Amino acid sequence: MLISPLSSALRSSVALRPISVAIKKASSFASSSIKMEAEKQYKFGPYKIDEKEVFYSTHLSYALVNLRPLLPGHVLVCPRREVKRFTDLTPEETSDLWISAQKIGKQLEIYHKASSLTLAIQDGPQAGQTVPHVHIHIVPRKGGDFENNDEIYDALDEKEKELKKTLDLDKERKDRSMEEMAQEADEYRKLFS
Ligand code: AMW
């Protein structure tokens, strides 16, 4: 029987279909696993953040425990994209960042048996920003944690050396070990699972 070029082309395209489907599936699996790996990598300005420090994440934002917390539960929420200024964020990033901060603040206030929250952004170096990557500070607050409530803003701004001495913040604010930070992040992660 004669096989026309057209029917032969049709037959080979049918035979090839399962292979092309398999290739498509494999490549979409590979690209989704690359995406998943990329989503596990976190940067905070110039610092590479170990995923053990991260206790909450969305596709646009993530939250990490603090290397030098001012008070228990002082954490940071950042956009995944490394941008310096608040106005560099897209509307989607802005919304996701604040919705994340709202959820995190609510849970950490309960966890630390606090009764209020400080949420603050130091937006730019003259406002006290030391890490050039937008971040919201979330600090669970209790009565009497700072003698004068607004001292927390001076404490956030590490340039206030005199005040730091008065409050002895240098003594309190040593860099913490990864073990201690990972343990804290493990505890917080349970609040969002
Ligand atoms: W900024 O002064 O930029 O508003 O706040 C920087 C915050 O980031 C501080 O609270 C500081 O303790 C914290 N910090 C700096 N480096 C790290 C890091 N590698 N991991 C976690 N927190 C960090």
Image (cartoon, helix red, strand yellow):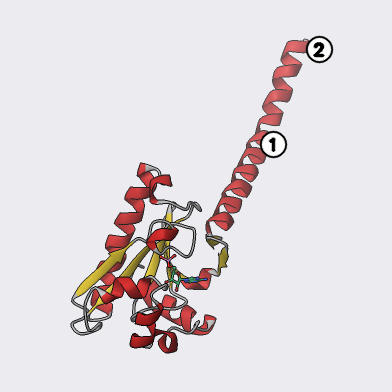
Query: How many neighbours does mark 1 have within 10 angstroms: few (below 14), some (14-19), or many (20 or more)?
Result: few
Q: In the drawing, what numbered circle is on residue 1?
A: 2
How far apart marks 2 and 1 lie (CA) works out to: 28 Å
- Residue 125 % position (x, y): 44, 59
Q: Residue at x 38, y 75 (%)?
A: 160
- Secondary element under disc 2, as helix, strand or loop, is loop
* Marks 2 and 1, the one that precedes in the sequence: 2
- Secondary element under disc 1, as helix, strand or loop, is helix
Pointer 2 and pointer 1: residues touching (CB < 8 Å)?
A: no
- Quickly name the residue at label 1: 19
Q: Is residue 1 above or below residue 73?
A: above
Q: 128 or 76, which lies in front?
A: 128
Amino acid carrying label 2: it is Met
Query: How many neighbours does mark 2 have within 10 angstroms: few (below 14), some (14-19), or many (20 or more)?
Result: few
Q: 69 or 170, which lies in front?
A: 170
Query: Does residue 33 show up?
Result: yes
Q: 118 or 115, which lies in front?
A: 118
Task: Point out the residue furthest to the front here.
Answer: 162
Q: In the drawing, what numbered circle is on residue 148?
A: none
Q: Is residue 73 above or below residue 48?
A: below
